[in-house]
Structures are given as C-alpha cells and as structure tokens.
Image (cartoon, coloured by chain):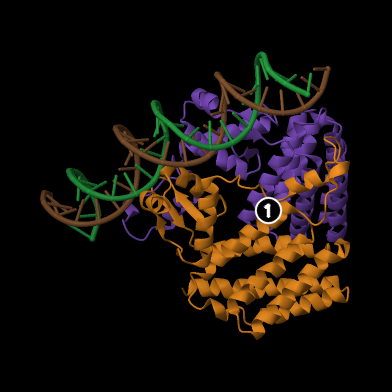
Chain colours: A orange, B purple, C green, D brown
Amino acid sequence: MDGAVDLFNMTTVESEDWLSALTEGRDIDRSSTAERVAEMLRARVLDGVIKPGQQLNEKALGEVLKVSRNTLREAFRLLAHERLLVHTYSKGVFVRKPEWQDIVDLYAARRVIETGALRLWAQADKQKQKAVADALQLGIDRQMKEDWAGVASANNRFHQAVVDLAGSSRLNEEISRLLAELRLAFHVIAEPHLLHADFLRMHELIVAHLDRGELREAEDALGTYFDRAEKDVTAGLRSA
Amino acid sequence: MDGAVDLFNMTTVESEDWLSALTEGRDIDRSSTAERVAEMLRARVLDGVIKPGQQLNEKALGEVLKVSRNTLREAFRLLAHERLLVHTYSKGVFVRKPEWQDIVDLYAARRVIETGALRLWAQADKQKQKAVADALQLGIDRQMKEDWAGVASANNRFHQAVVDLAGSSRLNEEISRLLAELRLAFHVIAEPHLLHADFLRMHELIVAHLDRGELREAEDALGTYFDRAEKDVTAGLRSA
DNA sequence: ATTGTGGGATTGTTGAACGATTCTTCGATA
DNA sequence: TATCGAAGAATCGTTCAACAATCCCACAAT
C-alpha cells in the first residue's frame, strides 16, 4: 500500500493490476496449524534448542503444543521432507544428525548450483548483483562487531543471493534447504565459530573478481571456498 | 544372492563386509501406508490418469483407496512438497496445473543444475559417463521403434545421468522432482509428442562434443537445447 | 555371551465427531 | 436482467479415543 487509490475511478471490472498485487503477498491467515507447528519446530531445530539425534515424542510434544497427534504428524512430514527430521518407520521422528557423507553430498550439490548460478552474473540485473555485495558488506560489519551469529547469517545470505542470480524460486528454495541442513551440522560440531575463519576474505575476493568482470576467477575462488569449507566441516564432524 | 556362502568358514564376528552391504539396499517392507498411497497417486498423476487442475476429494478418495482421511492427508503433504499437488487452505488439494511462469522458473533451475553438473564431466568416473551415452542410445532405439513414450522416458534418463555426474543424491532427487513437474506440464498441452522434435539430435551433438573433450561446446549445446525446449513448452502451455 | 520372553511404551492407522469455511442454490430486490 | 444475500449442502481442519503392530528394555534361561 504505497499510494492512494482513486475511489472514483474504480470499477468492478478491469482494474486488477493492484488486485493481483495483493495475491502476490503471503496469504493472510491461511495457514494450517500443521504448518505453524512445523514453522515453530523448524526454528527450534535450526537454533539448536532441539539437538540432532533427539527424538520427538508424539504424545509428549502434542500435549505441550496443544495439538493432536495427527496434526503433529503432518508437521513432521513437512520437516522430514526438508531433511531436518528423519522419520524411521515404527520408531518415530528424530532431529537429523548429519554424517560427514551427508556433508560431502551436500557440498557437491552446492558446488553445482552456486557455480552454475554465478555464471549468470553478467545477465542478472543490477539489483540482484547488489544483493550479493550487500550480503558481503553485512558480513564484514558483523565481523567487526564480533557478532559471530551475524557473520554466519550474512554468509548464508551471501550464498542465497548468488543463487538468486538465476532468478528461480525453485532453486532458491533448494539452496535454503541445503543451507538449513548445513546449519544442522554445526550443532553437532564442538566449536563451530572456529570454522568461519577467513571465509569473509574469500568472499571479498569473489566479489572483487566479479566487479572486475573476471568471471572465471570468481568461479575458481568460489570453488576453493567450497573445498575449504567442506574440508573443515567434515573434519569437525568426524572429530565430534 | 549371486554366490554360494561358505557355511563352514562363517563366524558370528567380524565378517561384516557383506552385512553392511545389506543395509545398502532398500528397507524391506518398512513403508507406511501414507507413503504407499503417495507413491500410487504420484504414478497416476504422472501418467495423466488424474489430470492437472482436478481436485482430490478426501472422503471419496479415502473410501476408494480404503485408507482413512488422516492417512490420506499425510500422503497429500508429501506430494504437495514435490509440487505435484497444490494444497489450498480450506479448499483442498488439486493436481498441479503448471503455468508458463512455472516453466520459466523450472528451466532456469534446470539450466543451472545441469550445466553445472556437466562441467564435472572430466572428473566423473567412466561408469557415470557411460550412463549418459547409454541413455542417448536408448532414446535413439526407441525413436526408431516410434515408441514416443519411450523416447520421452529416455530423455529424462539422459538428463538424470548428466546430473548424476556430480554424484550428489540431493541433486539427483531435485532433478527428479523438476522433471516430474515438467511431465505434469505435458498433460496440459494438447499435442505433447510434437515437442520432442529434434531433441535427440541435439543430445547426440552434446555427447559428440563430450567424447571429443570439447566441454565448452557441449555446455553450449545443452544451453541451446534448454532455450529451445523452454520456448516450445511455454508456447504449448500458452495456447492450451 | 547369546538367545528367548515377557510387559510397557510408542508408533501406525482408523473412524467418528464437530466447528469452520467454501460452494451452491434460489429467491428477493433494485 | 443483474446483483445481492441467506439457507443448506459439501468439504475441509482438527481433535479425540481406540486398537493393532512394533519396538524397547529388563530379566530369565541356556
């Protein structure tokens, strides 16, 4: 709602430009309790309040959240599909506990998606390019303030911005899922803050290359970032 | 079971090489009815038996399949997450009816993933490389026999093989979802068999380039394939 | 140390119930 | 004739209680 509507020129037909703009936004209330429960559980899992490996008891959890077992089970299905929970038949659902093989698989996927998206840099509009640089700047800010959670969050935003260069919502959702899954791994590692060592510098390098139109070099820099990150995370996971 | 087991040399301990091989295979029976129902519905939707836009009535469908509404709803959640169904609050679930914008988004994702994966051609093992060539050959076979469904299926297998070059199960699943969603679009188009016009030739070109180690050219050929395919499908969808 | 054998807890699935929401039908009104 | 609204049917959202199937654990038997 950024402008006044001329009520006198309104007709019942054919002024649907602003009407369709309404449907663009999120549906008002229209979310089921299962979805709200899932949303809430997702937040708790990602924050590490509920730890990897922990079982989610249907009855107990249902009583706390004041929802029926059936509704809860619907929420479980959603999160299991996002790989945040694992559903083992007849045993129940557990918070996913990523193994190092998962991380290898995950980084293989990220490598393909992100380098694939980065190649579209030149074709992307200025706004999307700016989002990448902005995310980097945000990370630098947070690092100066020694806000490590903020650094991690900015890092995620950086990579989401890179993928968004391709402009595909499906791809955006997938990278979000992958990053969320990765975040899960950090809750298994003892000292996760040690991991983001000099990643910001590597991101600066990427953006610097992009600014100079050195696409190939930017891709390579992204590649070495992945190599390094994968090595660190799998190592941290193995020793956990 | 392709060999005899030496019963006399068996010990209870430490012959776990074949034991771990067992867990590699799929879980035996361990699938819930919801998953089986989902599997069944997925097949029907992809075969076009249940057509895009059609509503899936909970009560009626539950009675036919002889499952309770709750179980059915769990299955719905799974398929909605795969974008084969859409779940509209308080209105029910419907078979997804892709719009042309969906196809644009979808192909943007495919472009990124598949070209990203194709770049790993040189690093992939021979077996995975062969799978790509095999899928192409299968398509050629089917075309000669004028088995158009077979051609389409081989086409899918080709692109799945390309993605599998990256060796990430997560990526494999994602491309499967995308291809399934695309298949949905064909059920909206009047004459889908017209679409696969000279795609096989383009695939031949890709493989030929790969054989000669001309990676860049192979990527470009894949790119033009996407351009062409996207144009055809969106056009077919617009005129449907 | 491995293999039975209970019983208790948890999950899988069902069927019924009821409020809330949507769709439909059909007059009433301008 | 077209619009509006209200009654009623259909469908969805969610809960609850129940029971079978399965798993888990402790303990006894060999």
Quarter-wise, where is residue D10 in the image? top right
Is residue B208 in view from this perspective?
no
The residue positioned 53% from the left and 64% from the top of the image is A46
Return the residue at label 1: B164
Left or right: where B240 falls relative to B74? right
Label 1 packing within 10 angstroms: few (<14), some (14-19), many (20+): many
- Mark 1 belongs to which subunit? B
Quarter-wise, where is residue B80 in the image? top right
Q: Position of residue A197 (x, y in %)?
A: 62, 82
Q: Secondary structure at mark 1?
A: helix
Q: Position of residue B151 (x, y in %)?
A: 77, 35
B32 or B119: which is nearer to us? B32
Is residue A135 in view from this perspective?
yes
Is residue D23 depicted above or below B73 in this figure? below
Q: Position of residue A140 (x, y in %)?
A: 70, 81
Amino acid type for the residue under numbered disc 1: Asp
A222 or A24: which is nearer to us? A24
B27 or B142: which is nearer to us? B27
Is residue B183 depicted above or below B218 in this figure? above
The residue positioned 67% from the left and 72% from the top of the image is A154
The residue positioned 56% from the left and 41% from the top of the image is B77
Is residue A91 depicted above or below B51 in this figure? below
Left or right: where A66 falls relative to A137? left
